[in-house]
Amino acid sequence: MRLLHTMLRVGNLEQSINFYTEVLGMKLLRQKDYPDGKFTLAFIGYGDESENTVIELTHNWDTDKYDLGDGYGHIAIEVDDVYKATDDIKQRGGKIIRDAGPMNAGTTIIAFVEDPDGYPIELIGKKH
């Protein structure tokens, strides 16, 4: 068994694809419209789905905003240098919601960025 993907519902598919590819450096792996169901699925990630866990962006054509609720946590992405990653993300127009620094009650360096729909994404420094 292996983890295949995490699905996020997004209000504006183009804006979300641009954020994940241009700001976070992922690749659009595949995209398909389902006219009978009035939705589009787009799969994004850092590598091929056959070997990597990816994110499925689901766009329901009749919905442009979702309530994230209080049960959702975040997606985590490992980066070599959290300080550099946050600087790069800011330069590419990304919204940092927690600057890089040690986690609460710990020493691991983390930061948080927010996607266009408000989903938080944690950046975690690579352990050496």
Image (cartoon, rainbow, N blue to C red):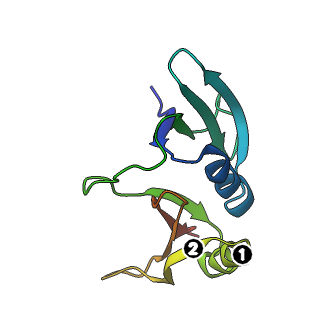
Q: In which quadrant is the C terminus drawn? A: bottom right
Q: In which quadrant is the N terminus drawn? A: top left
Q: Position of residue 45 (x, y in %)?
A: 65, 44
Q: Position of residue 92 (x, y in %)?
A: 73, 71
- The residue lying toward the viewer, choosing from 56 and 53, is 56
How many discs mark residues in the rendered view?
Answer: 2
Specify the amino acid type for callout 1.
Asp
CA neighbours of label 1 inside 10 A, class few (<14), some (14 to 19), many (20+)? some
Query: Marks 1 and 2, how far apart in space?
Result: 11 Å
Q: Determine the residue positioned at 32% across, 53% down.
A: 72
Of label 1 and label 2, which has the lower sequence position? 1
Q: Position of residue 9 (x, y in %)?
A: 46, 42
Q: Determine the residue positioned at 72% across, 41% down.
A: 28
CA neighbours of label 2 inside 10 A, class few (<14), some (14 to 19), many (20+)? some
Residue 74's place in the image compared with 123, above or below, is above
Residue 99's place in the image compared with 34, above or below, is below
Outermost residue, top side: 36
Q: Secondary structure at mark 2?
A: strand
Q: Position of residue 63 (x, y in %)?
A: 46, 40
**Disc 2 designates what residue?**
95
Of the numbered discs in the image, which one, if any, rests on residue 88? 1
Outermost residue, front side: 62
